[in-house]
Amino acid sequence: VSGVDLWAADPSTGSWRWVAITKPVTQNISQGLLQLQPRGTPCAVWPSRWLLYFPLYNAVSSLRIGVPDGSSLGPCSGDCGLGLGERPVVWYGSSITQGACASKPGDAYTNAIARALRRPVANFGFAGNCFYEPEVVDFLLAIDAALYVVDCNPNSEALGFDFVHNRSVALVRYMRQRKPNVTIVLASGTKMGPVWLEGTDNQHARGTRALSQAYDELVTQGLGRGLSFVDVDGIYAQPDGGIFWEMTVDGLHPSSLGMERITHFWAPILLERLTY
């Protein structure tokens, strides 16, 4: 999750591909990331668009980028192949959203989904937090977002069925009061730990039921337009997937492989919601 992560747009396809990452061995890092092959090298590639991801958990106080004499580097024009002119998806979540535990910043699922959708995804993941707080959402609603994902269950479900149910209902009502036409996706948490030992009525199952019931009640109350509920247990139940703990570092936080599965799950769902 540390270091800066360099990607480049493949000139032949326009897709973004990983290039290099710094090794954060000290507070101050000076490191060469890449040397392109000489012109005329058979089958070598010379990208013209570059993307640099900052660390997921460490702050960057200053950054300088150097290029060889005779070369130049500057801001790209247009949407940069990233849909930068589109309204963003705003993701309010936990440490999983923040990026734990991707092996490099570009693998974090919010970054990967942004590349897949070619639309900015604003990452508001707060490690150890995200409890359906209206005080936080106040700030997020100031963003002209195309869609909000509320992904608080990973930390909230430990506080019980009533907490998840009551807080999620209150938050959606509050968001609709502030922005009546806002599109909201309520996301359940993923399984965590040795749930196969816990039976069917476990903490995770209760949290998912609470959020699902909250969604049903909101729809019944006439707040269903632009509101959806997604049971994200499907992330690790895809036909070509594997057992969920094989895609996490601790039975909960996804590895880079887990981040890829999250991206594969969410990208088509969000694309559908964005085209409502």
Image (cartoon, grey):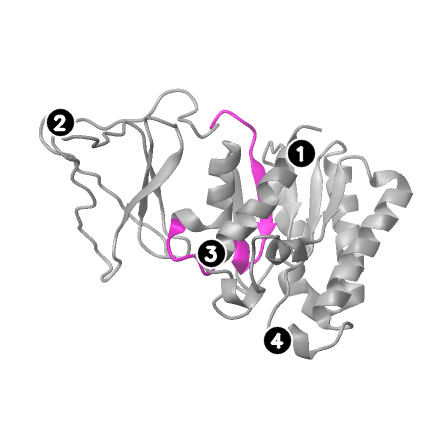
**Callout 3 crowding tier (Cα within 10 Å): few <14, some 14–19, many ≥20:** some
Q: Amino acid at mark 1?
A: Glu
| Distance in Å between CA atoms under marks 2 and 1 | 43 Å
Q: Amino acid at mark 3?
A: Leu
Instruction: Please tell me in which quadrant of the rendered image residue 142 appears.
Output: top right
**First along the sequence among labels 2 and 1:** 2
Instruction: Please state, as top left, top right, bottom left or bottom right, where the C terminus lies in the image.
Output: top right
Q: Amino acid at mark 2?
A: Arg
Residue 72 visible at all = yes
Q: Which residue is mark 4?
A: 194
Q: Secondary structure at mark 3?
A: helix
**First along the sequence among labels 3 and 1:** 3
Q: Which residue is mark 2?
A: 39
Residue 90 covered by magenta stretch: yes
Q: Is residue 19 left or right of residue 178?
A: left
Q: Which residues are magenta?
A: 84-105
